[in-house]
Structure formats: structure tokens, C-alpha cells
Image (tube, rainbow, N blue to C red):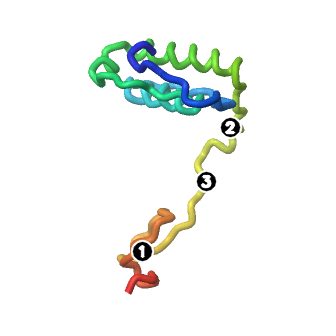
Amino acid sequence: MRILQPTQIGGQTGPVTAPATANDKLEAIKILMNLLQEAGQVAGAFDAEDLFRPDLQIFQLSTKTLFDKLKVLVGEKVTDPSSTSSPDLPTQIGSTGDRTSSPFVSAAEADSDAS
């Protein structure tokens, strides 16, 4: 946490979601930074090399400790295990015939307003 130098921006937001368990450093760092963001905090300036020096267990412990403290302050979001999968997005067929679930349609599509 000392490396990230988190700073509170505005009031505390909450409740926070219980962090997932990570098996590699990059994922553990992402989880920690997402938890900070969810709590209304931002990381200060840091050197990326310094961030990757500590062991994976340090990030896991930091994330758990931060979550435990935030849970007391702002509460915990209760997640339904059956709803953890992402919702199905409607499938669209692009001008090339490929199917895509992107909500964004290209301006070059046949049905677009761009002429």
C-alpha cells in the first residue's frame, strides 16, 4: 500500500465487493486497484517496477486487509453466486457477416445514417 500511496477523493463510497482471489501478481494488483477505486480512492504516482517487486502474498494480504477495514466502514455488497456470470449481450451481424456482441455499430454499416 505504501507503493501505491492511495488518496481519498471525495466521500467514501460503498458498500464494497469482496475481492476475488488471484493466482498471479498482475491480477492481484488489478484486484487491489479496483478495490481502491470502488472505495473512492485513487493511487498516487508510483514506479511500475516497484509495484511488481513484492510477492503475490503481499498483494493478497493487502487486499484482504483493506477489504476487511472498508467492510466495517462502508459495508459489503452481497453478491448472488448464480448472477456472477456476465449477462448475455444481443448478437448483431456486421457488414462482413461476422457476429458481434458489441453494442457499438460501425459507421460503415449498411443500415447506418452516414452516407
Q: Which amino acid lies under the numbered mark 2 shown in the image of this protein?
A: Pro
Query: Relative to the observer, which residue lies in front, 28 or 16?
Result: 16
Lateral position of residue 18 relative to residue 2, left or right: right
Closer to the chain start, of discs 2 and 3, is 2
Q: Which mark is residue 94?
A: 1
* Spot occupied by residue 40 in the image (x, y as percentages of width and height): 57, 30
Q: Is label 1 in a helix, a strand or a loop?
A: loop
Decide: marks 1, 2 in contact (CB < 8 A)?
A: no
The nearer-to-camera label among 1 and 2 is 1
Q: Residue 107, located in which quarter of the rendered image?
A: bottom left
Q: Which residue is tagged 3?
A: 87
Q: Which mark is residue 30?
A: none
Instruction: Using a 10 Å C-alpha cutoff, classify the residue at mark 1 as few (fewer than 14 neighbours), some (14 to 19) or many (20 or more).
Output: some
Query: Residue at 30% of width from left, 25% of height from top?
Result: 48
Closer to the chain start, of discs 1 and 2, is 2
* Spot occupied by residue 71 in the image (x, y as percentages of width and height): 68, 21
Disc 2 from disc 3: Cα separation = 13 Å
Closer to the chain start, of discs 1 and 3, is 3
* Spot occupied by residue 24 in the image (x, y as percentages of width and height): 39, 25
Q: Which residue is tagged 2?
A: 81
Disc 1 from disc 3: Cα separation = 21 Å
Disc 1 from disc 2: Cα separation = 34 Å
Q: Is label 3 in a helix, a strand or a loop?
A: loop
Q: Which amino acid lies under the numbered mark 3 shown in the image of this protein?
A: Pro
Instruction: Using a 10 Å C-alpha cutoff, classify the residue at mark 3 as few (fewer than 14 neighbours), some (14 to 19) or many (20 or more).
Output: few
Q: Which amino acid lies under the numbered mark 1 shown in the image of this protein?
A: Gly
Query: Residue at 53% of width from left, 19% of height from top?
Result: 63
Query: Relative to the observer, which residue lies in front, 74 or 88?
Result: 74
Query: Residue at 60% of width from left, 46% of height from top?
Result: 85
